[in-house]
Image (tube, grey):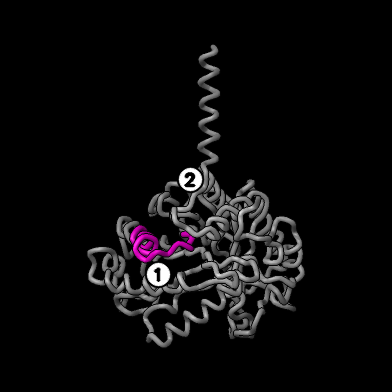
Amino acid sequence: MKKVIKLAVLFLHTIICFAQKKIQLVDKNATKETNALFTNLSELSKEHILFGHQHATQYGHGWYGEADRSDVKSVTGSHPAVIGIDFSGLSGRPDSMIDKEMNSLQKNISATYNRGGVTTVAWHFNNPVSKTNFYWNDSTAAAAVRNIIPGGSHNGHYKSILGTIAALAKSTRGNDGNLVPMIFRPYHEFDGDWFWWGRAHCTTDEFRILWRFTVSYLRDSLGVHNFIYAFSPDNRFFTEAQYLERYPGDEWVDMVGMDNYGDFGRDGKYNVEVGIKKLKIVSDYALKAGKLAAFTETGLESIPNTTWWTETLLKALRAEKMQLSYVLVWRNDVRSPTHYYAPFPGQVSEADFIKFYNDPYTLFEKDLKAIYTFNK
């Protein structure tokens, strides 16, 4: 009987240790600030979630390029805690345009860091083989993945593009002189077919090789040590096995996430309970594997639902005791009267968004304290 009890205790201890695997960046030479951000995001996710908005400080609904402005700040008095940017302009253009884009991005990233906020990077990467854009076009696009991985015809060209990204990462510093950490989220929504890196346009092995090569070349060959690498499919999964179908392995990923517009009101269709189950899969895997988790993209275009922030999004985020580092909604277009995902003054969901902002669970930029330093 005692032996059975001892075995049961040992089994329980093993389960607890397994469920609480220590988090650790895949870059053992990551900067102190990157390690601190990673650790602090993990700690904050136990009780809170950071709110993010794509391109929040670059432009918004009816404006562009105004210093220290965001639509979120105009409504709440604070910028989002997480600011989304994009590396889309760093390839496939004349060098003068790339240099201009790099300078603009560096100013934005540094400003976010200096204020105490967090930068996450998407990459709408124009096809480097057929010189088309990031969307797949059956008539003109090339199956690029097989050509840019090692042994492919365009691997050297891909290395050059990664060199440009590394140059930005290794020269973007804050006022304190330190390199700015960034959450780098390449090849998102790869389980769909709309991007050239989507599942219909490359094999599982090719995608995994591409991911591993990208991380290893940036980290080991080019010496980039201020990236947190985020893996984020779209919402086309219902089980952990499906979620991990193209996962490159724990040694290549720091953060697991999900993009999901479809379950949260796109085209007037809500399936929030299913959306919660998918988020739970992401959060549970992160805890099991020692990773961060995040709701990497979502939103309701035009936000016609006046209580979407508190009655849909907030309730979903707080369900199931998940641990999510941040939630990011998509951009507010400059010209379009309908393409926006965060409220601006006078927008119909503004009052509800203020309730969302004031909820103790959500964190905005003003709420962050020394996120790039270790707490004593």
Tell me which residue sits at (57%, 68%) in the image: 267
Above or below for 119 versus 92: above
Badge 1: residue crowd in 10 Å (few <14, some 14–19, many ≥20)? many
Q: Mark 1 points at which residue?
A: 195
Above or below for 23 versus 98: above
Q: What is the quadrant of residue 155 in the picture?
A: bottom left
| Residue 214: percent from left, percent from top | 36, 63
- Mark 1 element type: loop
Q: Report the magenta residues as a range.
A: 212-229
Tell me which residue sits at (52%, 76%) in the image: 106
Query: In this view of the protein, which residue sits in the foreground, 147 or 253?
Result: 253
| Residue 291: percent from left, percent from top | 51, 50
Q: Name the residue under label 2.
A: 289
Q: Is residue 221 magenta?
A: yes
Q: What residue type is labelled 2?
A: Ala
| Residue 286: percent from left, percent from top | 52, 48
Badge 2: residue crowd in 10 Å (few <14, some 14–19, many ≥20)? many
Query: In this view of the protein, which residue sits in the foreground, 113 or 342?
Result: 113
Above or below for 122 versus 270: below
Above or below for 180 versus 338: above
Q: What is the quadrant of residue 162 in the picture?
A: bottom left
Q: What residue type is labelled 1?
A: Phe
133 left or right of 300 in image: left
* Mark-to-mark CA distance, 1 and 2: 28 Å
Q: Is residue 138 magenta?
A: no
152 left or right of 306 in image: left
Q: What is the quadrant of residue 202 in the picture?
A: bottom left
Closer to the chain start, of discs 1 and 2, is 1
**Labels 1, 2: front one:** 2
Tell me which residue sits at (42%, 49%) in the image: 250
Give the quadrant of the N terminus.
Answer: top right
